[in-house]
Image (spheres, helix red, strand yellow):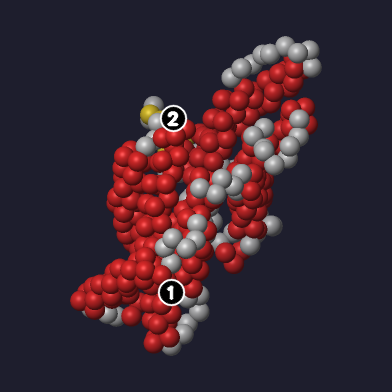
Amino acid sequence: AALAVEQAYGWSSEMAGGMYFMVVALQALSQLVFSRFVAGKYSDKRLLRQLELAQLLGAALMFQPWTMPRWLSLSQFLVASTVSYCSNAVWSGVMSSFCVKRSLAEVEAGTFFNSENLMLLNQVSIFLGISVGSIVSRAMQDLRPGVNTVAATILVGGLLQCNLSLIAISEISLDYVIPPLGLALGAGFAIAALLVPVGGTGPSNVFTWHIVFMGLAWPLFATWGYWSYRSLVLGWGKKKLRNLHMALMICTLVCSAVGYSFIFKAHSDRHEDGGHFGGLGLEHGRLTVSRGVGRFAHVLLGYSVLLGSVLQGVMGIYKRHMKLRDAATVPWHGQFGWLLLWGGYGAAALGTWLDFNGKGGWPSGIK
C-alpha cells in the first residue's frame, strides 16, 4: 500500500510511512474500542461474519476504476483501506477467542486439538500469512503498480478468508461454494475469450473456441462431475448421483474433444506442424522447443489429460456395467479422476498466461 501511494500520489517514503503508522494506530484503537463496547455481547460466529463483510466492503471501496480529483481519490483510498485493515485486525482477535472456546470443546470430544496446539496453529497461520502475503502483494505491485492492484490483492485474500470461514466455522456445505465457483470460472473463460475488448480473440477466430470449450470442460463440467458424488444438499441416492456424475463427465469429454478439434484446426490452417506439439521439434539431431517452455508444458499436460480422460471414460462405462451386476471393480477410478481434474486445472492455468494473440494474450487484470 505504501508503494502504491508513493507512485499514485507522488508521496515521499516518509509520508507513506506516516500513513502506514496512522493506519496501525487506528487498528490498535479499533481493537480497544471493540474490546470495551462490543466484545462478549454477540456470538463469535456473528462477529466474524460481520467483520469479514466489512473487510470485503473496504476492499471493494478501494477500487478506483475512473479518474477523480486527487484529494477525493486519496480520501477514498485512505478511508476504505482503514476500514478493511481495521476490520481484519479486530477479526483476528475474535478468531483467537473462537479458537480458545473451540479448543475446550475439542478436548471434551477427545480429539487431537487442545488449547495449546490450536492456539499455536493459529499463531503459525498468522505469521505464515504475513510472510506469504508480503511476497504476493509485492509481486503484484511489480506486475502492475497502483491502488487498484492493492485493492484486488486484499479482495482476493478477503474472499478466500471468508470462504474458508464459512466452511470451517459456520460449517456451510461446500455445495454452496464449489459449484458456483466452477460456473464462474467456466463462464469466465468463455466470456474472456469471446470478448475482444478484454483481450480475447473473438468468435470469428477458430482458436477462441478451443478456450471456450476447454473452459467449459474442466473448470465447469469436470468440477461439477467430480463434486456430484460428494453433494450433501441434493440428498439423492447413489444411483441418481451416479447418473448425474456420468452425464457431467460425458459433457466434459465431449467439450474436451471439441476444444481439441478447434486447436488442431487452428494450427492446421496456419500450417504449424510443430504447433500440435507445443513447438517440439528436432534440429541437428537434438530436441528443441521453439515456442517456449510454458506453451510446451501446456500442450504436454493437455495431451496427458485428454488421453487420460478417454481411458477414464472407458473405465467409467465398464465400472457402471459391473455395478449393475453388484460387482466392485476399477477401485482406482476415483483417484485417477482426481488427478485428471487437477491436471485440467493446471493446463487451464498455464494456458491463461500464454501469449495467444497479437496483443500478447489477456491483460494482467484478467489473468
Disc 2 residue crowd, few under 14, some 14–19, many 20+, Cα 10 Å: few
Residue at x 38% of width, y 29% of height: 286
303 relative to 64 in the view: left or right: right
Q: Is residue 291 above or below residue 327?
A: below
Q: Is residue 323 above or below residue 80?
A: above
Screen quadrant of the N terminus: bottom left
Q: Is residue 103 above or below residue 64?
A: above
Q: Position of residue 51 (x, y in %)?
A: 47, 63
Residue at x 50% of width, y 57% of height: 43
Residue at x 29% of width, y 50% of height: 127
Residue 80 marker: 1
Q: Position of residue 279 (x, y in %)?
A: 48, 39
Toward the viewer: 97 or 282? 97
Toward the viewer: 286 or 139? 139
Q: Position of residue 135 (x, y in %)?
A: 31, 54
Residue 110 marker: 2
- Residue type, label 2: Gly
